[in-house]
Amino acid sequence: PFRIAVFASGSGSNFQAITDAVKAGRLDVELGLLVCDKPQAAVVDRADRAGIPSFVFRPREFSSREEYEREIVKRLKEHDIDLVVLAGYMRLITETLVTPYYGRMINIHPSLLPSFPGLNAVEQALEHGAKVTGVTVHYVDGGMDTGPIIAQRALAIGEGESAESLTERIHKIEHELYPEVIQWVREDRVRLDGRRVRVIM
Ligand code: GAR
């Protein structure tokens, strides 16, 4: 089996979409592990209910980022994880994790990168008066939302559209796109060549 780990910090609607896609047979992977840095996050309950093992930790209980990232790498190896899927994991990832998993770690971000990286991407787009925004899935490198881009979907921002409405529409796109891209990786159709990504259709 092809085993994935999902990293999330919050509600976990993308985690749920991935779990649902596996159940529906649209995504041929085994959800081997949830990694979560917030013990109170709703995503932890979602994993428990789905019977998916989780590694939940409190960053403050480690002496450094390097120390908890080393622990995460250990867990990923124990669970024989082939692909790391960041889905609303709100922490910067450093070389301790990036180096062993480069090319095997992807992230989803709620904007058309390189526009609006970092936190509150939906609000950033509205503040800039952007007319178009979207969703990006990319490989993770050491930067903040800077890695090679695998897939993007664009959407037009409505006149006077609220952050709530735009967030909801972006989530809907994410929930369709992310399982699809993970399945491409599963089928070995995503090729990373320097900064360029080629998807074999
Ligand atoms: C998603 O919209 C994801 O794109 C975003 O967090 C949300 C998590 O929602 N990620 C980032 O902003 C990363 N910079 P979820 O917990 O319901 O899946």
Image (cartoon, rainbow, N blue to C red):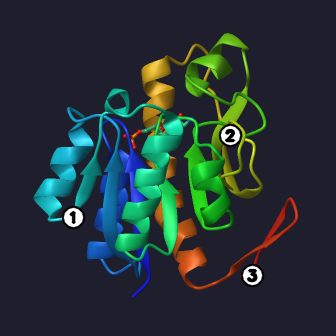
**Which of 59/175 is in front?**
59
Residue type at the position of mark 3: Ile
Above or below, 120 against 23 in this view is: above
Relative image position of residue 9 (x, y in whole percent): 37, 37
Residue 145 falls left or right of residue 55: right
Say which residue label 1 marks: 52
Above or below, 182 against 91 in this view is: below
Q: Quadrant of the C terminus?
A: bottom right
Residue type at the position of mark 1: Ile
Q: Secondary structure at mark 1?
A: loop
Of pointers 2 and 3, the one earlier in the residue sequence: 2
Say which residue label 2 marks: 145
The residue located at (46%, 42%) in the rendering is 67
Q: Secondary structure at mark 3?
A: loop
Q: Quadrant of the N terminus?
A: bottom left
Closer to us: mark 2 or mark 3? 2
Label annotation for residue 16? none
The residue located at (50%, 36%) in the rendering is 65
Label annotation for residue 200? 3
Of pointers 1 and 2, the one earlier in the residue sequence: 1
Farthest-out residue, left: 49
- Using the rendered view, name the quadrant where residue 68 is placed: top left
Relative image position of residue 10 (x, y in whole percent): 33, 35
**Mark 3–mark 1 distance (CA, rounded to whole Å):** 31 Å
Label 2 beta carbon less than 8 Å to ligand 1 = yes
**Which of 33/122 is in front?**
33
Residue 132 falls left or right of residue 59: right
